Every structure is written in C-alpha cells, then in structure tokens.
C-alpha cells in the first residue's frame, strides 16, 4: 500500500487525520494537496467513458458530480467526524437545503427547533411549507414540546446546538432517541460546536451539516459546506439530488478548506480559551447584563453543555443593559474588534443580531427567541486575549 494511503486514515488519531486524512498524491509526489481546477475529465476510450458513466469503473466524470480536490476535503472531514460518507457543497446553506430536500416529499412533516440560523429558519419556516411539507417549530430546550410534536408522517428533525445567537443547548441524545422511536432522521447543524467540540454523530445525529465558511476556513476567505451521513443516504438520496441540482463546491475553495482543516484543532482550542476568558471578563462589567456562554457555570444549561461538548465554543453573546443605544455605542467605540456578521474567524468579530442577522423577524418573534435589542454576539478570534478584553473595556466605558 502506498505511503499515506487513504486506508491509513481510520487508524490515525484526530490530529493526524486533520493533517493527512484523505490525501491522494498525483504522480508528481507533491507535499501540498493538488488543486484540480478542471470541470471535466477525458477517457482512454469509448468503453471507458461508458463504464464510468455506469459507475462500473472508478474515476471522475464531471466536476458537478465529483472532483479529486473536493474528494480529498470530503474524505478528511468524514474521517474527522467518524462518518461513513461526506459530500461537500458550495455553502453551508446549500448543505442544509440539500440535506432536507434530498429526502423530503409533499405530505412529510418536519420538527425543528425555533432558535435557528436565520436562513435555516427561512427554509423550514417558509420554503418547505410551500411544497406541502408541514413544519412544527419547538423550543429546543423543552423536551415536552419535542415529544408532543411528532406525528406518524414526521420524516426529519432539524436542530442547531448551541443555537445562534443565544447559545441555547439542545439535549442531542434525548432528541435522537425520540426521533428513532418515531422513525424520523435527526439532522444536526453542528456549526457553532465545530466537528471538534461536539461529536454530533456519536451523540445520535443521522446527518450532520456544516458551514465550512466558519471555523473550517476560519480565515475569512471562502464559502463552503458539507453533509455527513451513512453511505446509504449519500448513495440513494443525496447524490442524485446533488448531481442534478448542482450546488457543487469549487475545487479551489475545497483546497482552501483542506488547508483550514490542518490547523482547525489549534485554532479552535485557542479561540475557546480566549472566549472563556472574554466571557468571564464581560461578567465582571457593570454595564453588561446577561452573559451567555455555554462554558460559564452561569449558563442555564451548563451541565448539559458539559455532558455533550468538550468546551464552550468560540462565540459569546451578551446583553447591554442600556438596550440598542448602548449596544450601538459599544460597537462604534471598538478599535480592534470588527463589526461583521461572520463567525469562527481568526479575527474577533461582533454583530448586533436584532438589526442584522435577525432583522427580518417580527419584534415578537425576536423576543420569543431571547434576541433583545441590547444583545451582541461576539465571535472571539486568535488575537492576544488581553487586547480583546482591553478593546471591550474601553468600548464599554
Ligand atoms: C453560517 C451558518 C450557516 C450557513 O452557512 P453559509 O456558509 O453562510 O451558507 C448555517 N448554519 C449556521 C449555524 C451558520 O452559522
């Protein structure tokens, strides 16, 4: 077997998988993974083309269906997650949409937590119902609501934990058990936890989706997404959907994301340590009301977070007691931290959810989600944490 062959991946420990998993070298023996910027592939003869199209011979046929650089990213991520299969997509939203639409049909029912990333809420709340798919939204922290929501037609459960932006934690093993009892598949949007902090599949997810735009790139360069599951779901339901609808990841972006995976563990560990320190600091500031961070003992679901996550994550949300005016004043006084709605980046980024990511919602809907006018969401980066704290201190005043 060639050195570094993909079959080694399963015996490697996590850090090794992140650096070497899925690598296939071309005949040139390059150290860095090659970028195959090609839309198509050529065949040795007509019979070879026929066999590849029939799936009877290995090899790529068109980059909408598969590409060697994209396949390296998919294999590395599958090894990291411990999933049988992975398919990459152009964005995180393409991953969420494909994971749902590849399997749902009119007459099906979906149960989802209400505290979702804005575009995920749009898909489950507004798009699916247009196609005859009924959706029940529940408070993800209330097991009685989950229990009551299932129906014989329930095909899928969709949730996000920790949630954006209030960092609520959903009990993954408990919801997974309910989904199994009811014959429904559990899809977990694991972006805020990252593949490192919360092993969503081991905790009971059937399908895990990521926005690779966030921590996997983590340096603000490109968009990407991924869907992980067993091989049967990919082969029978997901692949036909992806091949014919075309949300493919560009080979160049796949290469950027592959390189991102190599340093993911180092970056996420440092960002979590910085986030914990910043959360503790914010708690000591008089002008700051509630501080929401799953790694703080004051988080209402601290014990649950400890049981299913290995750290509190890289995002801290906090409420300015003075409401929107105080939140805007703080944002406008920052000298280091950037105002931006991305997250998981090496640079610390802060956003005011009520007027940006969640501005489309009615005031009552925001209130129900705990998104007050004073709430700020801070994605803590890789700067020296003392500089981040000093910037916040001078901005809070
Ligand atoms: C960013 C994000 C998405 C969407 O990902 P894109 O790459 O921006 O399309 C979905 N879910 C969560 C939780 C996210 O944070």
Image: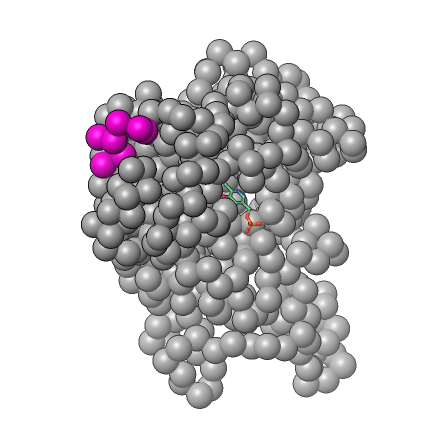
- Residue located at (33% from left, 62% from top): 263
- Residue located at (48% from left, 69% from top): 255
Q: Is residue 93 above or below residue 118?
A: below
Q: Position of residue 15 (x, y in %)?
A: 28, 59
Is 284 included in the stretch rendered in magenta? yes
Q: Position of residue 246 (x, y in %)?
A: 70, 58
Q: Quarter of the image holding residue 193? A: top left
Left or right: residue 98 compared with residue 337: right
How many numbered dots are placed on residues in this image? 0
Quadrant, the N terminus: bottom left
Quadrant, the C terminus: top left
Q: Position of residue 237 (x, y in %)?
A: 66, 46
User: 35 or 57, which lies in front?
Assistant: 35
Q: Quarter of the image holding residue 173? A: top left
Residue 23 visible, this angle: yes
Is 247 included in the stretch rendered in magenta? no
Q: Which residues are magenta?
A: 281-288
Q: Is residue 198 above or below residue 12?
A: above
User: 229 or 90, which lies in front?
Assistant: 90
Q: Quarter of the image holding residue 286? A: top left
Q: Is residue 270 above or below residue 53?
A: above
User: 165 or 66, which lies in front?
Assistant: 165
- Residue located at (44% from left, 65% from top): 258
Left or right: residue 283 compared with residue 74: left
Q: Position of residue 113 (x, y in %)?
A: 54, 26
Residue 177 visible, this angle: no
How was this image coloured? one colour
Q: Is residue 103 above or below residue 3?
A: above
User: 39 or 223, which lies in front?
Assistant: 223
């Amino acid at each position: 077997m060639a050195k570094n062959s993909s079959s080694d991946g399963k015996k490697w420990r996590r850090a090794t998988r992140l650096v070497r998993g899925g690598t296939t070298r071309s005949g040139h023996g390059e150290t860095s993974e090659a970028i195959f910027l090609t839309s198509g592939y050529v065949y040795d003869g007509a019979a070879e083309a026929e066999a590849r199209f029939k799936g009877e011979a290995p090899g790529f046929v068109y980059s909408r269906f598969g590409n060697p650089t994209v396949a390296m990213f998919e294999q590395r991520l599958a090894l990291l997650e411990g999933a049988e299969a992975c398919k990459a997509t152009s964005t995180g939203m393409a991953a969420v949409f494909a994971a749902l639409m590849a399997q749902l049909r009119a007459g099906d029912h979906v149960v989802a937590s209400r505290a979702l990333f804005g575009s995920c809420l749009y898909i489950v709340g507004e798009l699916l119902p247009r196609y005859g798919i009924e959706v029940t939204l529940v408070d993800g922290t209330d097991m009685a609501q989950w229990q009551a929501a299932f129906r014989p037609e329930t095909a899928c459960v969709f949730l996000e934990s920790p949630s954006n932006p209030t960092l609520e934690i959903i009990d993954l093993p408990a919801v997974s058990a309910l989904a199994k009892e009811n014959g429904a598949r559990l899809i977990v949007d694991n972006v805020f936890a990252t593949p490192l902090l919360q092993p969503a599949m081991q905790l009971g997810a059937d399908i895990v989706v990521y926005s690779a735009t966030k921590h996997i790139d983590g340096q603000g360069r490109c968009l990407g997404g991924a869907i992980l599951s067993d091989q049967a779901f990919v082969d029978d339901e997901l692949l036909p959907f992806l091949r014919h609808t075309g949300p493919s990841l560009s080979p160049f972006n796949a290469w950027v994301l592959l390189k991102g995976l190599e340093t993911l563990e180092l970056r996420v560990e440092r960002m979590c340590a910085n986030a914990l320190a910043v959360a503790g600091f914010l708690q000591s500031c008089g002008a700051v009301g509630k501080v929401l961070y799953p790694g703080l003992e004051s988080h209402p679901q601290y014990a649950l977070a400890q049981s299913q996550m290995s750290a509190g994550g890289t995002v801290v949300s906090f409420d300015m007691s003075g409401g929107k005016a105080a939140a805007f004043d703080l944002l406008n006084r920052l000298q280091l931290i950037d105002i931006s709605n991305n997250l998981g980046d090496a640079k610390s980024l802060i956003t005011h959810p009520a007027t940006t990511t969640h501005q489309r919602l009615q005031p009552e809907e925001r209130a129900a989600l705990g998104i007050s006018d004073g709430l700020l969401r801070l994605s803590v980066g890789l700067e020296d944490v003392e500089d981040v704290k000093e910037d916040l201190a001078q901005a809070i005043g």
